[in-house]
């Protein structure tokens, strides 16, 4: 088996409670050639010293402190300092199954046309036991999945292992995001690179009161605003990459998602108008853009485009 170095980037901020278990799950992987980069995004001195001392107890772990700039920028900081041929990410409150890297490296060696290997996660926490709630995205996260990612995120940031060369074509994480930066990145990566899905649990995601994923606002208008942000980011990234027909196709997928969200949540015309009014109060320009999409794709008329 290939023994190339794997770099694992753990971002952390003002939290030392769970990181020892996180690092331990990576240090003890059945695949041995691993470096662990803990990127501290500006934690307070007391927490930073504690996290650094925990990291220093593990032979493969190196600690970095930097001024606070958000998780996407912290991941980029780690990528630029990573020495490995392969890159993986883990959050400071989650952990990996012990043969995760071994399984993913095997896939990458045997399938040179695939550049990103993902898998399933299982949620756990105070009221959720291991393997009680498993998420796999079966049927949507294998092969060229660009179109599937236009609808929703089909992988979780802590599961993929990717070749470092992916960042050459794709670029880095967008530091303007506070959440959904991984969805934004995987969309862009999927335009060029094939995903391989292992339909097994590779990592465990902890549910707790300070978890950003579960703190994210689930209000419908906020979901529309987030979808608009990731699509706007994609179109900006693809300005010189996408053909006009591809750009139109992306907008059509965006329209369908807004239509689905609004139709599924509101049955009456009055309720839908109230939703748009609420959206207008938050973001007038986005509201006009959503209405524009409904006009150009009215009556469900599908635009003509070439296959991506």
Image: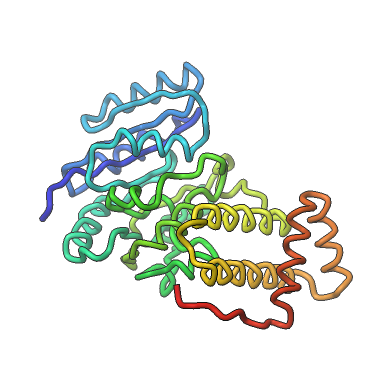
Residue at position x 62%, y 58% from top?
227
Give the image location of residue 118, x and y in percent: 35, 60
Residue at position x 28%, y 50% from top?
165
Q: Is residue 120 left or right of residue 220?
A: left
Q: How many marks?
A: 0
Q: Is residue 282 left or right of residue 21?
A: right
Give the image location of residue 127, x and y in percent: 53, 52
Residue at position x 66%, y 69% from top?
255
Give the image location of residue 302, x and y in percent: 62, 81
In which quadrant will I find the C terminus? Answer: bottom left
The residue closer to the viewer here, 67 or 80, is 80
- Residue most extreme to the left: 1
- Residue most extreme to the right: 270
| Residue 157 higher or lower than 38, as above or below | below
Q: Is residue 73 left or right of residue 167?
A: right
- Residue most extreme to the top: 45
In which quadrant will I find the N terminus? Answer: bottom left
Residue at position x 36%, y 52% from top?
169
The residue closer to the viewer here, 5 or 126, is 5
| Residue 149 higher or lower than 81, as above or below | below
Q: Quadrant of residue 211?
A: top right
| Residue 90 higher or lower than 122, as above or below | above
The residue closer to the viewer here, 301 or 102, is 301
Q: How is the image coloured?
A: rainbow
Give the image location of residue 60, x and y in percent: 23, 33
Q: Quadrant of residue 64?
A: top left
């Amino acid at each position: 088996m290939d023994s190339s170095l794997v770099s694992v980037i753990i971002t952390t901020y003002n939290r030392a409670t769970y990181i020892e278990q996180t690092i331990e799950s990576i240090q003890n992987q059945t695949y041995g050639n691993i470096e662990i980069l803990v990127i501290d995004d500006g934690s307070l001195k007391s927490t930073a010293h504690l996290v650094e001392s925990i990291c220093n107890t593990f032979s493969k772990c190196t600690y970095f402190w930097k001024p606070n700039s958000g998780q996407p920028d912290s991941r980029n900081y780690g990528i630029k300092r990573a020495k490995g041929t392969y890159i993986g990410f883990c959050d400071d409150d989650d952990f990996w199954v012990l043969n995760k890297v071994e399984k993913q490296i095997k896939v990458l060696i045997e399938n040179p046309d695939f550049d990103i290997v993902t898998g399933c996660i299982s949620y756990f926490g105070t009221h959720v036991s291991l393997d009680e709630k498993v998420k796999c995205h079966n049927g949507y996260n294998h092969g060229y999945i660009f179109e599937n990612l236009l609808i929703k995120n089909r992988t979780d940031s802590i599961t993929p292992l990717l070749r470092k060369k992916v960042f050459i074509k794709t670029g880095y994480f967008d530091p303007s995001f506070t959440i959904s930066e991984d969805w934004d990145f995987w969309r862009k990566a999927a335009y060029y690179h094939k995903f391989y899905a292992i339909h097994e649990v590779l990592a465990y995601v902890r549910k707790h009161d300070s978890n950003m994923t579960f703190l994210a606002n689930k209000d419908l208008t906020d979901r529309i605003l987030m979808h608009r942000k990731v699509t706007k980011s994609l179109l900006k990234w693809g300005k010189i990459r996408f053909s006009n027909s591809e750009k139109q196709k992306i907008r059509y997928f965006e329209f369908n998602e807004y239509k689905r969200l609004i139709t599924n949540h509101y049955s009456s015309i009055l309720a839908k108008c109230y939703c748009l009014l609420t959206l207008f109060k938050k973001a007038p320009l986005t509201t006009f853009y959503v209405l524009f999409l409904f006009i150009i794709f009215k009556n469900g008329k599908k635009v003509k485009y070439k296959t991506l």
